[in-house]
Image (cartoon, rainbow, N blue to C red):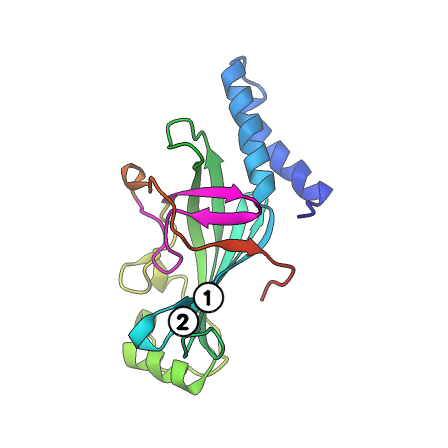
């Protein structure tokens, strides 16, 4: 993966603000390790297709990491092979990587805070389903019309991920394959003590295309 020099500069600067002025060599060492981990996440990633069996639905997740910020798209398909998209959900937010010494070997600490949420039905079937659910309090969803539901998503009952609430997760990057502890449909636990201690088997790989 190619990391642009400007991205590396800004990540380094942001992390340095928290540790470079410290007299504690451990703080500086932690900042260096966290910088390396942040840099390796930079770029766009796509997951494998995930089929939901008897529901005749499938899903795929796209994630893109920039310095301290991320965006995520969840694409929902009306088949078991991620062929015909019926709806999509897009989040943007902030993330930070912390000291992982207390985690099982191979796991890294990452915390996400989703900030915005946009939903779009991409087929008649998808629009009808969202209207039947009255998703986020809306009953007039239209095909290919994106709706910013960020305000509704700050409260419970919209989608699984509540905005402005920190999520505590883990990840591993090995041989250019990225895995997280949480599932992309539900997000990560919102209490630090419930941070996953093992990885979900869903694999993300780098992609040149962000949809």
Q: Nearer the viewer, residue 56 or 149?
A: 56
Q: Which residue corresponds to the image point at 41% horizontal and 78% vertical from the top-left?
A: 79
Residue 189 in percent (x, y) is at 31, 47
Q: Nearer the viewer, residue 13 or 176?
A: 176
To which quarter of the image does residue 53 belong?
bottom left
Residue 169 in percent (x, y) is at 39, 43
- Looking at the image, residue 24 lies above or below residue 39: above
Do residues under tags 1 and 2 come within 8 Å of each other at their CB atoms? yes
Labels in figure, total: 2
- Looking at the image, residue 152 lies above or below residue 135: above
Residue labelled with disc 1: 49
Answer whether residue 116 is visible to the viewer in this image: yes
Q: Helix, strand or loop at disc 1? A: loop
Q: Residue lying at the far right in this picture: please name it.
A: 5
Q: Residues within 10 Å of mark 1 (few under 14, many from 20)?
A: some
First in sequence, mark 1 or 2: give its number: 1
Answer whether residue 17 is visible to the viewer in this image: no
Indicate left or right for 207 with 76 as reference: right
Indicate left or right for 176 with 93 as reference: right
Residue labelled with disc 2: 58
């Amino acid at each position: 993966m190619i990391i642009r020099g400007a991205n590396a500069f800004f990540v380094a600067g942001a992390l340095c603000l928290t540790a470079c002025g410290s007299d504690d060599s451990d703080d500086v060492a932690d900042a260096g390790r966290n910088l390396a981990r942040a840099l390796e996440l930079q770029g766009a990633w796509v997951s494998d297709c995930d089929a939901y069996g008897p529901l005749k639905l499938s899903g795929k997740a796209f994630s893109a990491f920039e310095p301290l910020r991320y965006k995520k798209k969840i694409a929902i398909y009306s088949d078991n092979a991620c062929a015909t998209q019926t709806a999509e959900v897009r989040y943007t937010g902030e993330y930070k990587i912390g000291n992982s010494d207390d985690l099982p070997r191979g796991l890294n600490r990452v915390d996400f805070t989703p900030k915005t949420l946009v939903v779009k039905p991409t087929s008649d079937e998808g629009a009808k389903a969202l209207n039947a659910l009255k998703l986020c309090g809306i009953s007039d969803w239209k095909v290919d019309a994106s709706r910013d539901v960020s305000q509704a998503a700050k409260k419970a009952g919209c989608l699984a991920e509540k905005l402005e609430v920190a999520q505590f997760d883990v990840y591993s990057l090995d041989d250019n394959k990225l895995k997280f502890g949480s599932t992309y449909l539900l997000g990560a636990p919102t209490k630090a003590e419930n941070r996953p201690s093992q990885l979900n088997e869903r694999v993300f790989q780098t992609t040149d295309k962000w949809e």
